[in-house]
Image: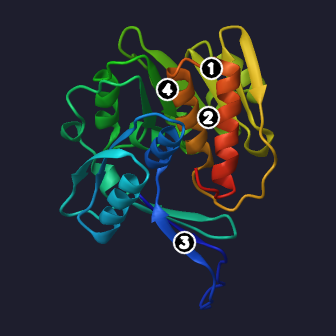
């Protein structure tokens, strides 16, 4: 997608001057960039339009060292999200909504696969996201819930990853409550019964991860949030890269929290 961040929000009928940032974004892209920054070789699979926004996405990926398998949609624009200083976000799925099974490589041979809930739990792209899971030939599968609204869909979903795949669930505190009817730590413990690792992201308070009977916590130095996009995605991409690289859960969680803090502060990876 393309993310547009406005440093102020006008009142109705007002025209105002403020800082506006336009850049490539979206959950999967942010996670792939973070994984590459953590030392992994990363490839993004997705769908964009044939517009200038698609060219922005491609050039940003190239500049960050991320390979891309991007289908081009001739009739739908590249997805976009606009965030305002008031905290509101307006999003358009665009070509993302038509990600198809044919857009996904026949085999995904990698150490880790990250799948966004915006693809997996929404109509139009769900079959393609499931195909990615079915075609994955690696060990670590990360699934991001994406939003509290989609958590209701995820709650009813039945995950059947290929044999030998280790599953990692990423959820915010609100998403975890929706999934498990519990506060973050107990939610992580409950979700760890369905997934090998359950991570609950707590914003400035860091994160909790549960695996089996073990629960670990980590946090990074507090930062002043400068970007409404990307912190949780950077967390996920970094954690998956660390786990796939053989790092144990607690230090991997610490690395992920640090990456999330840098993304929230809008610092370069």
Whole-percent x, y for residue 22 in the image: 49, 70
Q: Distance from label 3 to label 2 (Cα)?
A: 27 Å
> Residue 156, labelled with which disc?
4
Disc with the residue nearer the chain's start (1 vs 4) = 4
The residue shown at (72%, 11%) is 214
SS state under label 3 = strand
Q: Quadrant of residue 266?
A: bottom right
Q: Determine whether, in the image, residue 197 is placed left or right of residue 214.
A: left
User: Of residues 109 and 17, which is closer to you in this image?
Assistant: 109
> Residue 238's spot in the image, x, y percent?
57, 35
Going from the N terminus, do you reach mark 1 or mark 3 first?
Answer: 3
Point out residue 194 in the picture as x, y percentages from the top left corner.
56, 15
Contact, CB < 8 Å: mark 4 with mark 2? no
Q: Which mark is residue 27?
A: none
Q: CA distance from mark 1 to mark 3?
A: 37 Å
| Residue on which disc 3 sits | 21
Residue receiving disc 1: 191
Q: Residue at x 54, y 72 (%)?
A: 21
Asked if marks 3 and 2 touch (Cβ < 8 Å), the reply is: no
Helix, strand, or loop for circle 4?
A: helix
Q: From mark 3 to mark 4, how far is it between C-alphas?
A: 37 Å
The span from disc 1 to disc 4 (Cα, nearest Å) is 13 Å
Q: Which mark is residue 171?
A: 2
Q: Who is closer to the viewer here, 111 or 18?
A: 111
Please name the residue shown 61% across and 12% down the image. Answer: 193
Whichever of labels 3 and 4 marks the residue nearer the N terminus, that label is 3
Relative to 82, residue 9 above or below: below
Alpha-carbon neighbours of circle 3 within 10 Å: few (<14), some, or many (≥20)? few
Secondary structure beneath label 2: strand
Task: From the image, state whether disc 4 or disc 2 is nearer to you.
Answer: 2
Of callouts 1 and 2, the N-terminal one: 2
């Amino acid at each position: 997608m393309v993310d547009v961040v406005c440093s102020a929000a006008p009142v109705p009928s007002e025209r105002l001057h403020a800082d506006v940032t336009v850049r490539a974004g979206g959950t999967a892209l942010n996670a792939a960039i973070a994984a590459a920054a953590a030392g992994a070789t990363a490839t993004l699979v997705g769908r964009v339009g044939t517009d200038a926004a698609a060219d922005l996405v491609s050039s940003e990926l190239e500049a960050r060292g991320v390979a891309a398998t991007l289908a081009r949609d001739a009739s739908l624009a590249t997805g976009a999200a606009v965030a305002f200083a008031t905290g509101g976000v307006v999003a358009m799925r665009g070509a993302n909504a038509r990600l198809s099974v044919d857009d996904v490589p026949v085999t995904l041979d990698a150490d880790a696969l990250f799948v966004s809930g915006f693809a997996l739990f929404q109509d139009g792209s769900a079959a393609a996201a499931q195909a990615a899971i079915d075609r994955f030939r690696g060990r670590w599968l990360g699934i991001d819930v994406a939003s509290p609204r989609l958590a209701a869909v995820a709650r009813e979903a039945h995950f059947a990853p290929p044999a030998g795949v280790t599953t990692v669930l990423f959820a915010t505190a609100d998403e975890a409550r929706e999934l498990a009817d519990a506060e973050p730590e107990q939610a992580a413990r409950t979700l760890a019964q369905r997934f090998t690792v359950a991570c609950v992201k707590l914003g400035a308070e860091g994160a909790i991860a549960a695996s089996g009977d073990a629960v670990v916590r980590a946090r990074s130095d507090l930062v002043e949030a400068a970007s409404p996009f990307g912190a949780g995605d950077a967390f996920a991409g970094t954690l998956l890269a660390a786990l796939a690289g053989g790092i144990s859960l607690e230090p991997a969680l610490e690395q992920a929290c640090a990456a999330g803090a840098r993304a929230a502060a809008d610092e370069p990876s």
